[in-house]
Amino acid sequence: MSPSRILSLVLAVALIPSPAGAQPARSQPVGAQPVGAQPVGAQPVGAQPVGAQPAGSQPSADDHQQNLARYQQIAEDLGVTIAQTHVMRRQIDDLRSQIAERRALVGRVAAATYRGYRVDPLYVLADAGSTDEALRRLMLVSAFAERRQQEIDALSLTRARYDATQRTLEALIAQQRSQQQALVALRLKIQQPR
């Protein structure tokens, strides 16, 4: 992936709006020590860990290459995440239209029932000429009721799929943001003069 493509992906992700109610990014990671606090087992101020580079020294060429490789990997992962987000958005649009269609169908059934077009099983049986006729009529009433219940169940299932897809999309957007932040941090490391 070319650097210009990576940069355009990073910029595209930066333009994705935050979901409603999203918390702003914290300046300090969760579980981080307050400023001035020293974790248990930490070295005193001014001491350097074993193997650490002295202050003011430059990162090695190997570190730079590792950062570049990591940057490219995260950029590729970000590209995949962006593609997945686009697919999820299309799926959500399709599910929204399916929900609207199913609601309209269930609404027509409910409206017909409200207007009095429902079939009362006792009325169906009252003027049946024979038991066979009554049985056929009851089977027809049962088929109508079953079809109505199937439409309601289909609406519920579509709504559940929509909710699950929406949660997946929100997780992908959060993943995009974290990948973008990692890219920015690595870019700053890479751009430091050697």
Image (cartoon, rainbow, N blue to C red):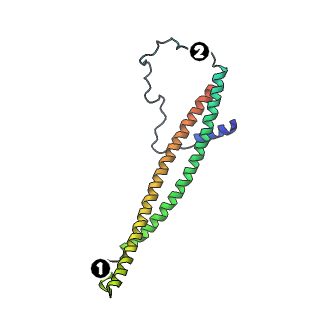
Quadrant containing the C terminus in the rendered view: top right
Mark 1: which amino acid? Leu
Say left or right for 86 vs 137.
right
Say left or right for 42 vs 142.
right
Q: Decide which of tag 2 and tag 1 comes sooner along the chain.
A: 2
Is residue 192 among the parts visible in the rendering?
A: no
The one nearer the camera, 36 or 74, is 74
Which residue lies under the disc numbered 1?
122
The one nearer the camera, 74 or 184, is 74
Q: State which quadrant residue 74 falls in.
A: top right
Which residue lies under the disc numbered 2?
53
Q: Residue 172's x, y, as percent? A: 53, 43
Up the image or down, 156 lies above or below 37; here it is below
Q: Secondary structure at mark 1?
A: helix
Q: Residue at x 59, y 39 (%)?
A: 78
Q: From mark 2 to mark 1, how far is it between C-alphas?
A: 90 Å
Q: How many marks?
A: 2
Up the image or down, 136 lies above or below 182; here it is below
Residue placed farthest to the bottom in the image? Answer: 129
Mark 2: which amino acid? Gln
Q: Residue at x 65, y 19 (%)?
A: 60
Q: Residue 124's x, y, as percent? A: 33, 81
Q: Residue 147's x, y, as percent? A: 42, 70
Q: Residue at x 41, y 62 (%)?
A: 153
Q: Residue at x 43, y 70 (%)?
A: 108
